[in-house]
Image: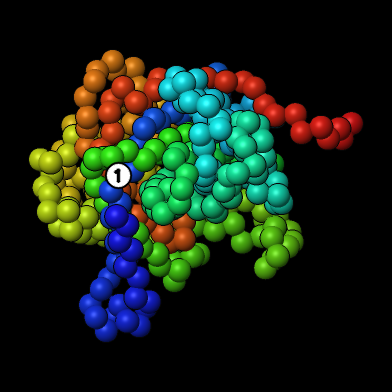
Amino acid sequence: MINQINFGANSCAEMGISMVLTKIEEVKISAMAAAVSNTWTALTDMETQEGPEVIAKFSKKTGVKGRYDANLNQTTADFCFAAAKAILKEKKISPDEIGILVFVTQSADYSIPATACILQERLGIPKDCIAFDVNLGCSGFSYGLNIAASMLKTSNADKALLLCGDTSAKEKNWKKKVKTSHSASMLFGDSGTATLLAKEKGAPLMHMISKTDGAGFRAIIAPYGHWRNPEPPVGESIGSRMDDIAVFNFATSEVPELVKKQMEEANTTVDNYDCLVLHQANLFILKQIAKRTGFSMDKTLVSIDEFGNTSSASIPISLVKEYGDVNENKDIRALMCGFGVGLSWSTVDAYMNVNDILPLVHTDESFDDGYDFD
């Protein structure tokens, strides 16, 4: 059964409805994988550029100790491809079984076409497949799970691949030659993830709530380089910028309220969950959300120390870090929440088996699209 409720802004206000609630039965998370390069950079390696005091202060505040960097020719799609291939191989699944492919990123290979179309061909998935991109950042995994699971439940497809990731560190480093924030280049990491969804009789209810506040669109934005403002002013970069105070206030007010609302709607408490899996904005924000929702840090997964802020990949990466090397046939219940650019935030209450969470994949491979610019 799928139950989606959306009465529109005016009706919601009149009827006291403040959320879009999705409930899906008999669709499960069948596998999860994450991929990074073989290049891990410690923050201490940046001391010559930034100074040891700056690095120490930044690391203490954010929790970042290092991050994986994409190689020169690697893109988000390359990491998602590697993660998806690992799932297909481990689970002995033919590409012919995939009917839906959703690619969530803000660092697509091209402006056009959609990178999902290219990944469909690269993965050997048949033409009888729905494939499209979703432009979302830190809420992308939870939103993407909602989209892919809803489409799977209401179509004749048996399996769906949700691919999420970004190469934010690569973007920030590339744009440091123009005016940009050095702290931003230290915060982010590069990665891609794959999550396999499958229909299964008797699979437990997957429960999701999603919210959006476009009034906060300036909080995280890349204002230049697209059709609204094609050219940046002299000295400004095309890259993104963030209003730290606005983001902090949003993350520590709206997000805890939604997490608590999710538990209220599901009639659960903290004790019903094995883990709280949040977007890895920074360690201080994670601690604030955990505290305000009643979760201990023992139950709150942390991956920002090793991977940095990995945008839409951060929730699956946190699960891979925690469970990827654990060989145990155990079902866990996770309360997940992605939040960020948009402003956009979303929760997911779902079960998965520990053995379906694969070890971290390392790859230095990149796609050759046939273009030669030499």
Which quarter of the figure has residue 276?
top left
Residue type highlighted by circle 1: Glu
Q: Nearer the viewer, residue 68 or 268?
A: 268
Q: Measuring from the top left, give residue 267's x and y in whole percent.
A: 12, 54
Q: Is residue 92 left or right of residue 356?
A: right
Foreground pick, 228 / 186: 228
Q: Tell me the quarter of the image containing the N terminus.
A: bottom left
The image shows residue 218, relative to residue 34, as above or below, that is: below
Image quarter hosting the C terminus: top right
Q: Residues within 10 Å of mark 1 (few under 14, many from 20)?
A: some
Can residue 77 be seen in this snapshot? yes
- SS category of the residue bearing label 1: loop
- Whether residue 336 sits left or right of residue 151 in the image: it is left
Residue at position x 16%, y 42% in the image: 295
Is 351 drawn above or below residue 250 in the view shown?
above
Please tell me which residue is depicted at 43% across the width and 22% down the height of the picture: 91
75 vs 149, left or right, is right
Instruction: Give the percent coordinates (x, y) of residue 52.
Output: 46, 28
Say which residue appears at 30% left-offset and 77% top-offset.
12
Q: How many discs mark residues in the rendered view?
A: 1
Residue on which the image places disc 1: 26
Quadrant hosting residue 81: top right
Foreground residue among 298 and 261: 261
- Residue 162 visible somewhere in the drawing: no
